[in-house]
Every structure is written in structure tokens, then in C-alpha cells.
């Protein structure tokens, strides 16, 4: 089965750009960030015994390998086909190592420094409004996806959204404007449980006063949360990202 067919089977789309959550007009950086965002949810380290997730991760790596190669991307854009015999796709490659070479570990200090520069900016405001529209005002999903956000940030996030509604920049979705007190309470309870988990990990790992940072890290790594990491990667990409080597064409 070819790459396009496997994408259709595993990701319910035969469009390689859609697999990465991007479009044909995406820049090289957009494609890279799309790969990172989608791969976070299915990375083998999260569920080492999940065969389906591992298969998806491998296919995702191949999709990125094709779209990040200018020559292969041009062929796909013009003809809608993929050369299955290129070395990138045909060789027995470790896609986990490939991923780690592209995205080396980002330290806790990197996250803390980025958060200080990001919060309160127009960039954050636009990101919040975009997520608000994407999830039509569902604060459960919004708070899962806002970058560097915690339960303590919810009043501030809600204020950003309300300001956008008042200025008619976004629609007033009932899920936000008419959210029940019960739902808010349940969200707070989940956040408190997460905080308690962080405290326990803090004690076990002997992290001392680094509790707040650990809480943020747990949130960033939540398995089922889609992260709006575009701004984060854009700021760190030059420092950490490595470009993969050019692939060689095989015989057709």
C-alpha cells in the first residue's frame, strides 16, 4: 500500500497537507510546525505499546519527508503522486530518531523564558481568539489548547475573548457566553487534580520549588490535548531545529 493510500486509511484523508493540518499554500515553516503539532499526539513515547499510534507516527514522518523536500513536494503538487522508491520512503528508517533530530529536547528554562515573553502580547491575544473560534467557545477545549495556560490564567483568557466579542472581532458563541456554573466547577476540579498530581511528582522527583514549572510541563505534555505550538516553535526554531538531509531519488 502506498503512502497516499495509508494516509487515507489512517488519517481519513488522502491529502498530505491535510494530514499535517496545513494547505498547499503552507510555507516550509508551516509544514514543519504542522508535523510537530500532529506528531505530539501520537508520539510512540506516549504509548509505546500502541501499534496503531506507532504506525501513524511512521506515516506522518514520511508525509513530512515528502513535503519538506522541494523536489518531491513539486511532484506531489503538480501530479498528486509520491515517488515510493525514493530513499526517504523505501529505507528501513527509525522515524523516532528522525523526529528527535528535527526537534531536540526543549528545556524547562526555555519554556519559562518563552512564557514571560509571550503572555500579554498581541500574538497571544490573536492565538486565543483563533482557538476560541476553532472550538466555538468551548472553554474546556480552549483551556486545553492555549499556549502556556493554566487554570489561574482562565479569567485573563476569558477577558481576552470577551474583549474580542465586544469589538465584534469574533462571534459570541453560546458555549462561552452561556456556560453553566457546573461546567466551570468541573473544569476547576480537573485542574486541581492535575495540580495535585504535579505536587506528588514534585516530591517523588525532589524538584524543590520548581512546582510551577512542573505543572506547566505536565500541561504541555497532556496526551489528549492539541497544543497551539506555532508561536513557541517560531521563537525557538532557529536555536534548536535541524534540517534533515536531502533525500536521494531511487529508480522509477
Image: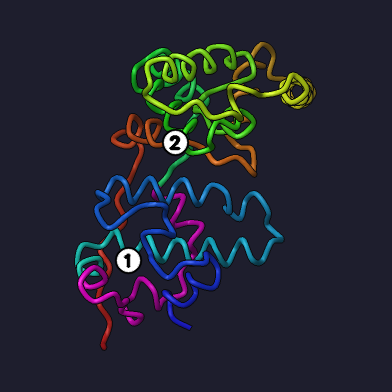
Asked whether, in this view, residue 177 is left or right of residue 101, the answer is: right
Residue 202, position in %: x, y?
A: 73, 21
Segment tinted magenta in the rendering: 75-102
Q: Return the mark for residue 77.
A: none
In the rendered image, the vertical position of residue 85 relative to residue 238, given as above or below = below
| Label 1 vs 2, first from the N-terminus | 1
Residue at (37%, 24%) from the top-left corner? 169
In the rendered image, the vertical position of residue 11 relative to residue 26, given as above or below = below
Q: Return the mark for residue 229.
A: 2
Identify the element where label 1 is drawn. Answer: helix
Pointer 1 local density, CA inside 10 Å: few below 14, some 14–19, many at least 20:
many
Tags 1 and 2 in contact by the CB under 8 Å rule? no
Residue 189, position in %: x, y?
A: 78, 22
Between the C-alphas of marks 1 and 2, the distance is: 22 Å
Q: How does the figure colour the protein chain or chains?
A: rainbow
**What number of labels is visible?**
2
Res. 195 image quadrant: top right
Residue at (34%, 18%) from the top-left corner? 122
Check disc 1 and report the residue beneath it: 66
Amino acid at each position: 500500500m502506498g503512502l497516499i493510500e495509508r494516509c487515507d486509511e489512517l488519517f481519513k484523508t488522502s491529502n498530505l497537507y491535510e494530514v499535517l493540518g496545513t494547505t498547499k499554500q503552507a510555507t516550509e515553516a508551516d509544514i514543519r510546525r504542522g508535523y510537530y503539532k500532529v506528531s505530539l499526539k501520537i508520539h510512540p513515547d506516549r504509548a509505546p505499546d500502541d501499534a496503531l499510534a506507532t504506525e501513524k507516527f511512521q506515516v506522518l514522518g514520511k508525509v513530512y519527508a515528502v513535503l519538506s523536500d522541494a523536489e518531491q513536494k513539486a511532484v506531489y503538487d503538480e501530479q498528486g503522486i509520491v515517488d515510493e522508491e525514493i530513499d526517504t520512503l523505501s529505507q528501513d528508517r527509525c522515524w523516532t530518531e528522525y523526529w528527535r533530530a528535527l526537534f531536540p529536547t526543549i528545556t524547562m528554562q526555555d519554556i519559562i523564558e518563552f512564557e514571560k515573553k509571550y503572555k500579554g502580547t498581541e500574538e497571544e491575544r490573536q492565538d486565543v481568539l483563533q482557538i476560541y473560534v476553532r472550538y466555538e467557545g468551548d472553554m474546556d477545549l480552549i483551556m486545553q489548547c492555549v499556549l502556556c495556560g493554566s487554570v489561574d490564567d482562565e479569567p485573563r483568557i476569558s477577558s481576552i475573548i470577551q474583549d474580542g466579542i465586544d469589538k465584534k472581532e469574533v462571534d459570541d458563541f453560546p458555549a462561552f457566553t452561556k456556560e453553566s456554573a457546573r461546567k466551570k466547577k468541573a473544569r476547576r476540579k480537573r485542574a486541581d487534580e492535575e495540580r495535585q498530581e504535579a505536587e506528588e511528582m514534585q516530591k517523588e522527583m525532589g524538584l524543590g520549588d520548581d512546582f510551577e514549572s512542573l505543572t506547566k510541563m505536565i500541561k504541555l505534555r497532556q496526551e489528549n490535548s492539541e497544543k497551539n505550538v506555532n508561536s513557541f516553535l517560531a521563537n525557538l526554531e532557529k536555536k534548536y531545529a535541524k534540517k534533515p538531509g536531502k533525500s536521494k531519488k531511487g529508480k522509477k
